[in-house]
Amino acid sequence: MSIFRAFFHHAAGTRQRGHAGRLVCAGLLVLLSACGGGDDGSGESAASTAAAGTQSSTPAAAGDRWLPQVKAVQLPPSTQPPATEMAADAVAAQPATQRAAVATVATVVAPFNNGVEDPGLLMLLLPDEQPATDPRVTAWLDAASETGTRIAVVTDAQFLAMAPAKALKYAGLVLPDQLHVIATDALLASVRSYVTAGGRALLTYDFGALTLNANNQPVYPIPKSRLSDLAGVDYVLYDALLGQMVGLGPVTAMRSTMRELLVPPGKSLPYNLAQSSATAAKASAVAPGTGQAPTGSNGLLGAARLAAGEALYLPTSPGDPGGVKGFDPQQFQSLPSYSLQDRQRSAAGQVRARSVTVDFGKAFKGRQPAAATRVQPAGLARHPLTVASAEASQASASLAGESLQAAEVDTLDAYNGYLLGHLIYPTYVTTGTYAGTPLALSPSFGLVAGIQTTGTGKVLFVNMPLTYLKGRTDALPMHGFLRYFMEHLVQGAHLSAMPNGVAGMTLDWHLDSMAAQQPSLHLEAAGVFNTHKFSMEMTAGPDTIVSGDGLGWNLNNNTVAQQLLRRLDAKGHAIGSHGGWIHDYYGLNATENNAAEFQPYLVQNRSAVDTVVGRPARGYSAPQGNNPPWAMTWLEQQGVVAAYFGGHTGLGATRQYRDGVLLNPALWVFPVTPQGTYATFEEWQDYNVPKAEVNAWYQAMVDFSVNYNTSRMVYAHPPGANDWIDVVKGLLAYGQTKGAKFKWYTMPRLADFMATRHQVGWTQTLLANGTTTRFTATHPTTMAEMVWMLPKARYLRPTIVTAGSVTVSDGGTVWLVTGKPVTQAQFQAQRNPTFIP
């Protein structure tokens, strides 16, 4: 993202906190159909939202936090799309191969997994004719790999051929959305028998949402989904709700549950149900004579200008039974950063709120459902919440001078997006009383996720289109729920996504312009770059905003900058290219359709940086987060293995699913993690985010990484970081308090590890004694740095079968099995006698 502050320095020391963040009282009634309306429930002050909307040159009250203003390209209509439009969608119903697959049964069926039983292998249930190369399928395979588990495709015919007893020899059953919306009664009966007999199933969104009528055409079952008993609530209620059976709104869960779903601090924010309901009418007003959203509009729902009692819905049809085609979250993967005018106003003390425009697609307004599932807060799932996870409850206690421990409150949170506030997701309206354990809820539409016991088995129902979201640059929900399924329902072993099992973070420095030179030198002199290794990318041209402005690094002719990069490279930092030669011009103008014009900017920039460092750069970040697909392909061709990315926010290192497909499989992307609605120093300084809150967030990020054995990426620019150098030093010092449990990683370092890890093959076999599981692992070159984590609740201390292949150590709640520089390894572990499935 673009930060140019040479001439627009804003004194950070004059900013003060004007109000404390609000917490959601645990005694509130959670949900669900009565709340919502136009406000997104963020709990921010009226003064700050007013400032965000009016575009005033000064805040409404000195020191108040400023929120971004979210506007709609076009306001959602108050009626659903015409029937003719929905009928056109239906023409694209399900592929003929899927309809044929559910109508026929193969006479000869190859056994699943070649008949080899594996108690650690998940089954992904797909129609018989579904190609395994479909990107929607590989999205699940890759998600399993990246979260450290294993999954394989089981076809309908294979699953039907397995009696429940045979299917129970595997870890669990995943019922994916988008891929299997049509299902026969026989298949669903087999799924039900499997669960009742003790199986674990992950049931997602529109799996089995349609059936075939007498004419072999897909239709909705009447009166509800045939899997409602397994989900624990009634859904797919076409008969009762017709065009209003899929809502579009925030998804909430207790903060501790969000963390278990791999949602890092800052990627979820408190959701205030009471405020959401009370301010609905205010948020629906129209500013006189403007036709625009009111000054108090707040977040995505505020931009929709909903009246009290209204909600957003998505149109559905047999061609789009979950309504996902009506709203595209991929629009959020490249949001606007600062403009030159923003920086000029900052220098003049006339900061304006950031402005974001959202396209609501085919969403339309309607009355909130009258009978959506309700859940009392006492019934919401909660998990252990560490001091770190409290993230100072976003300011309430820490800003009052209290300790982080005092702020350890398990609030109701909602998924959050950079500059957007609470995100909105498609969910089916659910009705009925939920007897299971609810994990996530919609403030308007009912249950989003929960665990239901059926017979001796369990079902994790996820009422979100996980497959669709991952394909549209929001993979965090899929990865999070898959991890939760393995951790809490299957309770299986997994392969760590961290080298040697050591958690960490990536701090990515963007060197945008000459304005960063003196701050960089000061940070270097202060020792910030001495101890840990960071990613650092430079925009190397002589200009920054437009050609000829002379504001760039001019690396080819800047001896000071050249020497700086060489010193940083010698210290082990990953030096890379920050896009396209003229930072702002490239960031604001490069598109999917002008590669011929802008690829030379990438070539020039890369050549300048590579010449100084003496070897090809392997890391990259895009000016203003602008990553056109052609640019990513070019980078992959140049040997770049790691890139900063504005999509999949809040996730660790992953590969770039975008436009519904996997792009650039050799290029690992590093999604940015926001701190609420902002992400870096200059934003915090300009919009009055207090230091104490940033400090608390950074510490929470470190602890989140350690607690969940993961890594997340945050980024900085030297000018803003230098202004708050005490915060930078505090972050580094806090990381050191974790000792050997935490490490700073560069993007290329983690990309190399993930690529090597992706080649690990491993299986589990239950030995004849029925209590010992043998693990067999292979790798084409080396298993060094690979670590398997076996939960102590399920396994006793592992023993080594192949001498010299692994080591075993105590990791607290897990056993750590660390690979050595070998290509094959075997170890085994007995079941803990106290283990309860």
Image: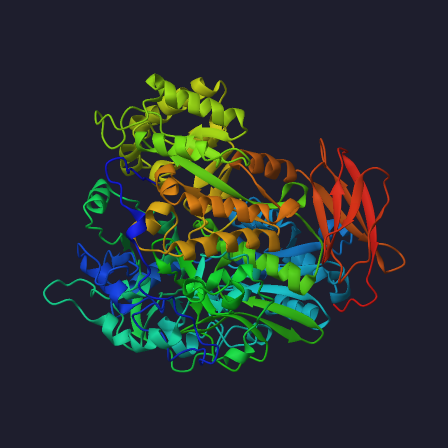
Q: Position of residue 560 (x, y in %)?
A: 38, 21
Would you say residue 174 is visible in this rendering? yes
Q: Residue at x 45, y 57 (%)?
A: 267
Q: Position of residue 835 (x, y in %)?
A: 78, 66
Quarter assignment of residue 372:
bottom left
In the displayed structure, would residue 210 be above or below residue 564? below
Q: Nearer the viewer, residue 17 or 686?
A: 17
Q: Position of residue 86 (x, y in %)?
A: 33, 63
Q: Nearer the viewer, residue 433 or 648?
A: 648
Q: How is the image coloured?
A: rainbow
Quarter assignment of residue 271:
bottom left
Outermost residue toward the right? 769
Residue 710 relative to residue 277: left or right: right
Quarter of the picture holding the N terminus: top left
In the displayed structure, would residue 190 be above or below residue 483? below
Q: Residue at x 54, y 79 (%)?
A: 378
Q: Residue at x 49, y 42 (%)?
A: 670
Q: Nearer the viewer, residue 823 or 89?
A: 823
Q: Nearer the viewer, residue 561 or 192?
A: 561
Count of numbered tags: 0
Outermost residue toward the left? 289
In the displayed structure, would residue 363 be above or below residue 808? below
